[in-house]
Amino acid sequence: MARSESQTEATIEVDWPIDRLLEHFNRQLRQQGWKLDSSAQGDVSASSTWMRSTDTDVSVIGVLSALHSGEDQFDLEFRISYFSP
């Protein structure tokens, strides 16, 4: 099985609690066809893991992570792993 990964990172400023921030991005992922596998949330961090299939038998797993890194500041990361037969 072959595997490859890709990721993107961003720091944003928004006056939201971490649960609202995670739900904002989770809603976008659902609208794009991703299926939620799991999620977790603490006081300063949150994450969700997503799955998606493609037409070419490639499985895709995405992990969204958010860290409350300062007043109204969040560090975000979305990491994607591709698995093919």
Image (cartoon, rainbow, N blue to C red):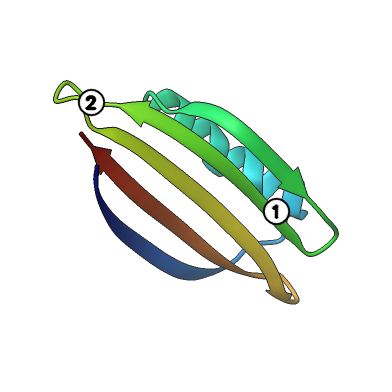
Quadrant, the C terminus: top left
User: Is residue 43 shown left or right of residue 26?
Assistant: right
- Say which amino acid is labelled 1: Ala
| Residue 6 spot, x, y in % from top left | 30, 59
Secondary structure at numbered mark 2: loop
In the image, residue 9 sits, relative to residue 18, either above or below, namely below
Mark number, residue 54: 2
Looking at marks 2 and 1 on the same chain, the residue that comes earlier in the sequence is marked by: 1
Mark 2 residue type = Thr
| Above or below for 60 versus 5 | above
Residue 55, quarter of the rendered image: top left
In the displayed structure image, the side of residue 64 where residue 23 appears, left or right: right
7 left or right of 42 in image = left
Residue where numbered disc 1 is placed = 46
Q: CA distance from mark 2 to mark 1?
A: 27 Å
Instruction: Please identify the quarter of the rendering in which residue 42 is found.
Output: bottom right
Q: Is residue 44 above or below residue 37?
A: below
Q: Are marks 2 and 1 in contact (CB under 8 Å)?
A: no
Outermost residue on the right side: it is 43
Q: Residue at x 20, y 25 (%)?
A: 57
Q: Position of residue 12 (x, y in %)?
A: 54, 68
The residue sitting at 49% across, 62% down in the picture is: 77
Residue displayed at 58% across by 30% down: 37
> Crowdedness of circle 1 by 10 Å Cα count: few (<14), some, many (20+)?
some
Image location (x, y in percent) of residue 66: 62, 60
Tell me the element at label 1. Answer: strand
Vertical side of 34 occupied by 72: above or below = below
User: Which residue lies at the image location 50% right of the left edge and 49% below the top edge?
Assistant: 63
> Disc 2 vs disc 1: which is toward the camera?
2
Dot 2: few (<14), some (14–19), or many (≥20) neighbours within 10 Å?
Answer: few
Q: Along the line of sight, which residue is nearer the eye, 62 or 57?
A: 57
